[in-house]
Image (cartoon, grey):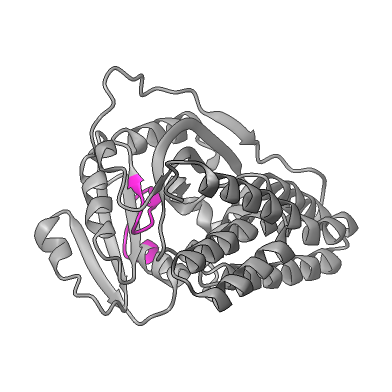
Amino acid sequence: MLLVSAIIPAHNPGGYLRKALQSVQAQTFDDWDLIVVDDNSSEDLSWVPQEFPRARLIRQRHGGVSVARNNGILNTTGEYIAFMDQDDLWRPDKLWRQVEAMQREPDAAICYCDLELIHGHGGSELTQPKGGEDINIEPIVELDGSKVGEGGPEIASNVLRSLRHFSQRFVVPSTVMLRRKCLATSGLLDPFIPFSGDYDLLIKLGSRHKVIRVPSADVLYRKHDNNFSDQYEVGRREVKALVARYVAYAEATGDRQLAREAPRLFHRPRRMYAAQAFDRARRSFAERQYKDLAYHFARSVWFSPGYSLGSSFKWLVARLTPGSSR
């Protein structure tokens, strides 16, 4: 049995998927298998196992990213599960560092690393090893998995602690490695949360197990016009549903503190949604779609007035600067 199972959901990935697969293939750690879950793409992905013989391709009806990741989990056997998005890249030592960290911390359910942001088609150079770098970076224990109290309420208190933790960090699926056996305490991703199910899963696992971080930017998180972060309204609605779920759980378990804090903590992403809406507004301006510009800018202001107005000022200054292409 291979040690790591890498899972990539794919839905009309264009040219990005090939680069993602190349970055998996370039890993210095070799004890892995890889499954690509085709979420009913209109593109023909039959080339995947032909070009990458170590990759398996399975197909499903369109069910969203959470269903695709579950499908991948159920069709692999690795002790560790490494998620990857179809448009991101891994540095060559990513899996090695995380496996080393998980083996040092046998109680850890989650290991995540840092990331770098890239735009468009950049980042292909990161499939090459970075010479002379120490791969044995000491992991940092961020949640120790200890129980806060006794009986039922202690679980709710741990949920609050995990929610506080992940609401303050930008942890994307491509940075995450999970210990498979720990899913017995959390379940798989919720299929009714098609896009934000990974966020919910991290909170549930973090409420019962140790969480560690490898402080190395081993993932390139790609920002482009067609990725899911562009659909900020969908993410906002899912977070709203998660708030209702966690508040209901808090009320059922008598955890008043969780009931009070959950709405505020889940709405920390408002600044992120403001940034995504502002990007859409800026693109609408470039395309002279002024009705869309007004809509997306208004949404950005509604999510975070401070961010939107500050970004507008910076954007105007950049446009008025000689030689600027913005």
Q: Residue furthest bottom?
A: 61
Left or right position of 47 against 273: left
Residue extending furthest toward the left: 50
Kindly tell me whether residue 164 is visible in this rendering.
yes
Q: Foreground residue, 44 or 262?
A: 44
Left or right: where 291 falls relative to 46? right
Res. 186 visible in picture: no
Q: Tell me where residue 220 appears, x and y as whole percent.
A: 39, 44
**Residue 236 appears in which quarter of the rendering?**
bottom right
Q: Is residue 49 above or below residue 293?
A: above
In the image, 220 versus 256, the foreground residue is 220
| Residue appearing at x 46%, y 40% in the figure | 115
**45 relative position to 307: left or right:** left
Residue 149: where, in percent of width, then height? 82, 45
Residue 275, given in percent of the width and then of the height, sits at 60, 56
In depth, the one of 310 and 57 nearer the eye is 310
Residue 317 occupies which quadrant of the picture?
Answer: top right
Number of marks in the rendered image: 0
Q: Is 120 rendered above or below residue 245?
A: above
Measuring 20% from the left and 70% from the top, which residue is drawn there?
A: 45
Q: Which span is picked out in magenta? A: 73-89
Q: Is residue 33 magenta?
A: no
In the image, what residue occupies the spot 25% across and 29% down? 129
The x, y position of residue 167, in whole percent, is 68, 50
* Residue at 51% from the left image edge and 72% from the top image edge: 194
Q: Is residue 71 above or below residue 155?
A: below
